[in-house]
Amino acid sequence: MTLTETAHTLALLASEGGEHGGASASPYATGGGALLVLLLLLWVTTRFNRDR
């Protein structure tokens, strides 16, 4: 699969996202969830870092 085929496939999937009738995730909920996960990973990393 070439880069252009991959880009075309991803663009096609993105354009069909709202046509299936399902509720799409809110961008704020998605960003907030990602931020929460990254902060949790940062906290776990600093707790288990024994080099300090």
Image (spheres, rainbow, N blue to C red):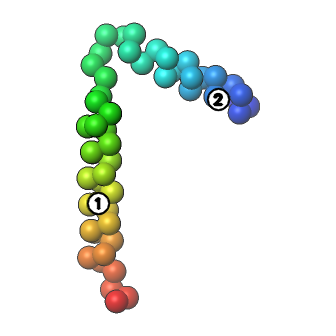
Residue 43, image x, y percentages? 27, 68
Residue sitting nearer the eye, 9 or 31: 31
Residue at the (49%, 22%) spot, across then down: 14
Residue sitting nearer the eye, 31 or 42: 31
| Residue at which label 2 appears | 6
Quarter of the image where the N terminus is located: top right
Residue at the (30%, 51%) spot, across then down: 35
Relative to 6, say whether 34 is above or below. Answer: below
Residue at the (55%, 18%) spot, across then down: 12
Q: Foreground mark, 1 or 2?
A: 1
Q: Quadrant of residue 33?
A: top left
Quarter of the image where the C terminus is located: bottom left
Residue 15, image x, y percentages? 49, 17
| Residue at which label 1 appears | 39
Q: Amino acid at mark 2?
A: Thr
Describe residue 3's horizontal placement relative to residue 18 as left or right.
Answer: right
Q: Quadrant of residue 39?
A: bottom left
Comes first in the chain, label 1 or label 2: 2
Judged from the image, the secondary structure of the residue bearing numbered disc 2 is helix
Residue at the (33%, 86%) spot, across then down: 50
Q: How many marks?
A: 2
Q: Quadrant of residue 8?
A: top right
Judged from the image, the secondary structure of the residue bearing numbered disc 1 is helix
Relative to 15, say whether 50 is above or below. Answer: below
Q: Amino acid at mark 1?
A: Leu
How crowded is the residue under tag 2: few (<14 C-alpha within 10 Å), some, or many (20+)?
Answer: few
Relative to 38, say whether 14 is above or below. Answer: above
Relative to 12, say whether 25 is above or below. Answer: below
How crowded is the residue under tag 1: few (<14 C-alpha within 10 Å), some, or many (20+)?
Answer: few
Describe residue 51's horizontal placement relative to residue 1 as left or right.
Answer: left
The alpha-carbon separation of the residues under discs 1 and 2 comes to: 31 Å
